[in-house]
Amino acid sequence: MTFPETNLLTCRACPRLVAFRESVATAKRKQYADWTYWGKPVPGYGDRQATWMIVGLAPAAHGGNRTGRVFTGDKSASFLFKHLFQSGLSNLPDSIERNDGLILRQGYMTAVLKCVPPQDKPQAVELAQCRPYFTRELETLTNVKLILALGRIAFNGVLTYYQTRFPIKKRDFPFQHDGINELPDGKVLVSSYHPSPRNVNTHRLTSEMFLSVLARCKEVIC
């Protein structure tokens, strides 16, 4: 189920992001010419009683921005869910569209930025504007034991939330692939390279590497 956040769905706080998400939704990609693109901020998705959550950077231009669900309909999603399925954390091996029957097993997925940024490069002010929505998710999902951050920006987004509530310093939480840190409230923060086509195609992130990360996560949540 998607996170019911009416204010998020009507948010137009970042002019650059609004212009970009809507231009992509209008121009479309040739292979998706018959789609009605979502073209709005993309809410989180999953189990409200989740014990684990995945945090990414932002919806993809022709993925979440098209389908209306985070990590859905793009190559990053295909890599991610192939391995979530192999690890027993989802009921399907791919995330294709909002009505595909996908279930995250006691999990939840979201992004620190709810709109697709040009060239996947958000501005600091945009991340700050969007932070209250991410904060609401973190504070509502009270059963979460583990957060898996995909990429440095997602990792830093989680730490920024904790910095506002605890006397921590980001330098004490270095980002590294397959890294694990205990957060001040007892949650575990695991970090991984993002499953982007660039990382996968250059073998910076391999199946074996990502399965190792998911195995580490399961040790915490099971």
Image (cartoon, helix red, strand yellow):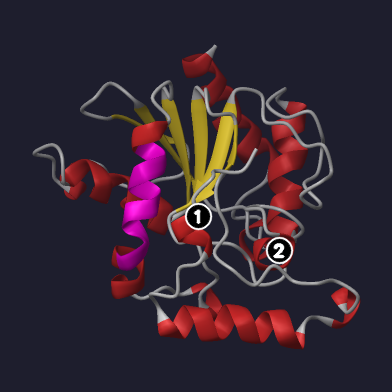
Overall secondary structure of the magenta stretch? helix
Q: Which stretch did the figure color magenta?
A: 129-138
The residue sitting at 68% across, 56% down in the picture is 76
What label sits on residue 116 in the rendered view? none
Dot 2 or dot 1, earlier in sequence: 1
Task: Classify the position of the N terminus by image quarter.
Answer: top right
Q: In the visual, does 151 lie left or right of 97?
A: left
- Neighbor class of circle 2 (other Cα within 10 Å; few <14, some 14-19, many 20+) is many
What residue lies at 39% left-to-right and 52% top-to-bottom? 133
Q: Nearer the viewer, residue 176 or 138?
A: 138
Q: Which residue is located at x 56 percent, y 35 percent?
A: 108
Give the CA distance from mark 2 to mark 1. 21 Å
Q: Position of residue 140 (x, y in %)?
A: 39, 33
Image height of 158 relative to 105, above or below: below
- Name the residue that disc number 2 marks: 63
Q: Type of residue at label 2?
A: Gly
What residue appears at the point 47 percent right and 59 percent down from the top-left corner?
8
> Is 99 within the magenta?
no
Quadrant of the rendered structure where residue 187 is?
A: top left
Percent of width and height locating residue 51:
50, 22
Q: Quadrant of residue 31?
A: bottom right
Kind of residue indicated by mark 1: Thr
At numbered mark 2, what does the secondary structure look like: helix, strand or loop?
A: loop
- In this picture, residue 147 sits left or right of residue 87: left
Disc 1 crowd rating (10 Å Cα; few below 14, some 14-19, many 20+) is few
SS at badge 1: helix
Q: Can the viewer see residue 155 in this picture?
A: no
Residue 111 seen in the current view: yes
